Image (cartoon, grey):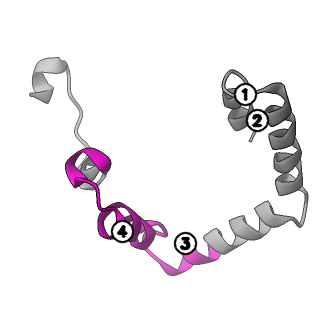
Amino acid sequence: MARYLRSLEPLVSPEELKQTQELVAEFETPGGEGERLQARLQRRAARMDNWITDWWVQSAYLENRLPLAVHSNPAVVLPKQDFNDWKGQL
């Protein structure tokens, strides 16, 4: 969450940053919403091969009415490849 807050600093007003810092502190409170959400994701991950696949397919492909080629990232389903130089990428 600290990285998130640091990334906001150049983008928002001091008032917005302060409000966001307060929301993050509330989210991180032990026993708070952050812990509850993390526990739910961990339970979901224990039941599935990939906890985000169903949500990703629904959100990126089925609900999104924009052209898929530029508004989704199909490369995540391709096998990992290592390229020695830029020519290998072509």
Residue where numbered disc 3 is placed: 45
Label total for image = 4
Q: Residues within 10 Å of mark 4 (few under 14, many from 20)?
A: few
Q: Which mark is residue 2?
A: 2
Which tag is nearer the camera, tag 3 or tag 4? Answer: 4
Span shown in magenta: 42-71
The relative height of residue 29 versus residue 19 in the rendered view (above or below) is below
- Image coords of residue 31 (percent x, y): 89, 67
Mark 3: amino acid: Ala
Instruction: Check the picture and name the quadrant holding the C terminus.
Output: top left
Cα distance between the residues tagged 1 and 2: 6 Å
Q: What's the distance in space between the residues labelled 4 and 2, CA to CA?
A: 32 Å
Which mark is in front, 3 or 2? 2
- Separation (CA) of disc 1 from disc 3: 29 Å
Name the image quarter holding residue 42. Answer: bottom right
Do tag 3 and tag 4 residues touch (Cβ < 8 Å)? no
Foreground: disc 4 or disc 2: 4
Q: Secondary structure at mark 4?
A: helix
The amino acid marked with disc number 2 is Ala
